[in-house]
């Protein structure tokens, strides 16, 4: 799974990147709304994590532009703005979920996983990779060969995932 984080606070972006990478995700980060919009438009991401308050172009404008362009990639909005009206505005702009700062990383990870599940058939079809008798389940982070489980370290899993995808 390929995740794009659009977050201007480099420490927060590094924290999320580290946690998601350790959980087996491939993560890229952008630090301005303009940079994030450009990267997101490449269409190579399975999930977007977007901070609401960004320099150059705010997070809601990024999301609205992506939705206007027809992009259906799930978006998790991160924000210090946590009033009901703020959350409603974020969801109305095209966000699929809204997480108020501060948050526990475990909750962010659970929400990313939930967005992946909710995406339905499109993501589910991409979750399982098969080459001959080798199967890689991206969602469950499992690899089997001829029905037998193969235990891999996170880096080994990501490498195998890359090789099987290309």
Image (cartoon, rainbow, N blue to C red):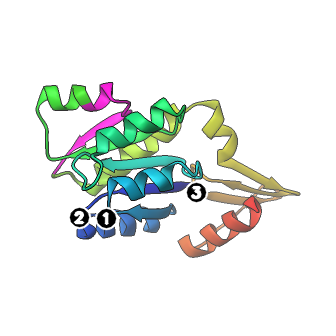
Position above or below: 64 against 18 = above
- 1 and 3 marks in contact (CB < 8 Å): no
Q: Nearer the viewer, residue 137 or 5?
A: 5
Q: Is residue 91 magenta?
A: yes
Secondary structure beneath label 3: loop
Q: Please tell me whether mark 2 sits on a helix, a strand or a loop.
A: loop
Which image quadrant is residue 12 in?
bottom left
Q: CA distance from mark 2 to mark 1?
A: 6 Å
Among numbered discs 3 and 2, the one appearing first in the sequence = 2
Residues at badges 2 and 1 in contact (C-beta under 8 Å)? yes
Q: Which residues are magenta?
A: 90-101
Query: In the displayed structure, would residue 53 be above or below residue 163?
Result: above
Rounded to the nearest angstrom, the CA distance separating label 1 from label 3 is 23 Å
Can residue 5 be seen in the rendering of this structure? Answer: no
| Residue identified by numbered label 1 | 13
The residue sitting at 41% across, 59% down in the picture is 35
Q: CA distance from mark 3 to mark 2?
A: 29 Å
In percent of width and height, residue 103 lies at 20, 51
Q: Earlier in the sequence, mark 1 or mark 3?
A: 1
Front tag of 1 and 3: 1
Q: Position of residue 142 (x, y in %)?
A: 63, 57
Residue 149 image point, x, y percent: 70, 61
Q: Is residue 85 visible?
A: yes
Residue for point 57% across, 49% down? 139
Dot 1, crowdedness within 10 Å: few (<14), some or many (≥20)? many
Q: What residue would you read off at disc 2?
A: 9
Q: Nearer the viewer, residue 154 or 96?
A: 96
Does the magenta portion include 28?
Answer: no
Residue at 33% from the left image edge and 39% from the top image edge = 61
């Amino acid at each position: 799974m390929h995740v794009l984080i659009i977050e201007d606070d480099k420490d927060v972006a590094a924290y999320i990147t580290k946690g998601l990478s350790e959980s087996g995700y491939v993560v890229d980060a952008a630090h301005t709304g303009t940079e994030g919009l450009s990267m997101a438009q490449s269409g190579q991401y399975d999930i977007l994590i977007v901070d609401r308050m960004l320099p150059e172009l705010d997070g809601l404008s990024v999301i609205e532009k992506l939705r206007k362009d027809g992009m259906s990639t799930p978006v998790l909005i991160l924000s210090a703005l946590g009033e009901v009206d703020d959350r409603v505005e974020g969801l109305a702009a095209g966000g699929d979920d809204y997480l108020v700062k501060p948050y526990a990383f475990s909750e962010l990870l659970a929400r990313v996983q939930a967005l992946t599940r909710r995406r339905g058939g499109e993501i589910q079809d991409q979750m399982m990779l098969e080459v001959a008798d080798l199967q890689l389940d991206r969602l469950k982070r499992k690899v089997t060969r001829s029905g037998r489980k193969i235990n891999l370290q996170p880096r080994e899993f990501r490498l195998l995932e890359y090789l099987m995808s290309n």
